[in-house]
Image (cartoon, rainbow, N blue to C red):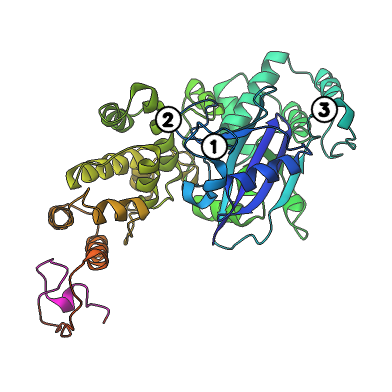
Amino acid sequence: MPSYVISVSAGKGCYRHICISADATLFDFHAEILDAFDFIDDHAHAFFMDNRIWSDLDSYYAEQIEDELRHTSDYTLGSLNLIAGKAFKYVFDFGEEWEFSCKVLRVHDDPCIKPAVVRRCGESPIQYEWADDSEDSDPYYYSPEKLEALYRELSLPDKTISLLHTYFAAMARLYGVISLKKVLEIINVQNDPISENDFIAFSEIVRREKHYYSIFGEDELYDNGKITSPLDREIIEQSLYSLDLGEYEEMKKVQNGKPYYIPSKEELLKYADEDYYEMTRQRSAMQAYLRRRVSKAQVEDFDLELQLYATLGTASMQRIMDDMTRMGLVFNGFKDVQNFISLLTDMSNHSRMALNRGHTPVEIGAIMKTKNIFPRSISFGTNMTAALKNGAMDLDELRQGILRMELPNENLRQSMLGEISRIGASSSTAAVVKKEKTGRNDPCPCGSGKKYKKCCGRDQ
């Protein structure tokens, strides 16, 4: 059973990273959040998985809210198709309306036996004045008063300080990892140059602030790391170091040798907004598809969800389609599924990714002379399987469509045909009879028209 590391923020500079198993319910997660922030569980709560409080699209409420259809005690985290980068809201006490911002930082294959807070930053907000027994805040981070005093000592105008903050946030999101030396280079190309001394002084203050990124040197990341000069330190997006350095090391490995995509100043600064994604022709095509399928109010929610998947570039197709079905998107037969997959693949290939240092797969493929990465196998998720079993989608139509469909590799076609055979066999109500073993030169039972030895029997 997999597990998650989820960042829960009660405001800027105050967050907890909670490790919790996929088989935990939303109610269990609610209890862990309150415990992590020292709150008393004496009011109702709700989760809004589309990241908009009081939205009806994908919401889950406490059991005492009887007129709601979905209750937090009935849904596990694993049933929500969570992926790294997924953002959602948690609201506690509908009167005071305590709002917490949640973001999935990591998805682990290993289970989390017991929920735990693996990273803590900032003092908890005070739920009740009489319950205030807070301790001193993390000594690594400076108080607002000390930070303000340090900024006053800089020989930089307030406008420049604000601009630098925006640059740091934007580059953390667009690139995931980037050295301060490269950051300064980009800033000085797009603006009046800033001296190294002023830039280093600014970055030293930022290191003591609380952001959704940090600035670390190798000597701070590893016990035996070499001493790092200030400009060789890196801005690192928080999901890459939330639990351990595995994601950070993998990102560095994948990025190695790739050039940076450096947009115009105006475009680059837009990435400081966590909901900003470049509007491409491919994204517009997906939005047009969504407008024909869901309400006008839902288009933005589906668009942002799909853009997150496209930008990460790591989620399986079955996970994405299951998530769309859970959110209310209904696929009307194979042609509709084929159209959706084609639109999403096109959008993904033209989406900017941190693993490509901001380039799209199409751009980096042309630069590095590599092919786009496509899956070589697929398994249908629970929602797709159910639709095929109950007749909402026709197995034979899907099989014939896959045989005609242009796919990036033959392994993927055979994997999809194998899934159809599996589902067809499990849903059959006919009496079980003993079948003779398929000969290697016999037609493959999957219906591909090929000999068994050149199709599903290749590995036999």
Residue 293 vertical placement versus 394 (above, below): above
- Residue 327 visible in the displayed image: yes
Residue assigned mark 2: 301
Q: Main secondary structure of the magenta part?
A: loop
Q: Which residues are magenta?
A: 443-459
Front residue of 11 and 361: 11
* Element at label 3: loop
Task: Label 1, secondary structure: give it.
Answer: strand
In whole angstroms, how far apart are the C-alphas of marks 1 and 2? 11 Å
- Tag 1: residue type? Ala
User: What residue sits 22% from the left and 73% below the top?
Assistant: 456
Q: Is residue 229 visible?
A: no
Q: Quadrant of residue 183?
A: top right
Indicate yes or no whether the magenta region holds residue 452: yes
- Give percent across and percent down for residue 166: 62, 24
| Residue drawn at the location 39% of the way across and 33% of the way down | 302
The residue labelled by disc 3 is 128
Q: Which mark is residue 87?
A: 1
Q: Earlier in the sequence, mark 1 or mark 3?
A: 1
Q: Residues within 10 Å of mark 1 (few under 14, many from 20)?
A: many
- Observer-nearest of 94 and 123: 94
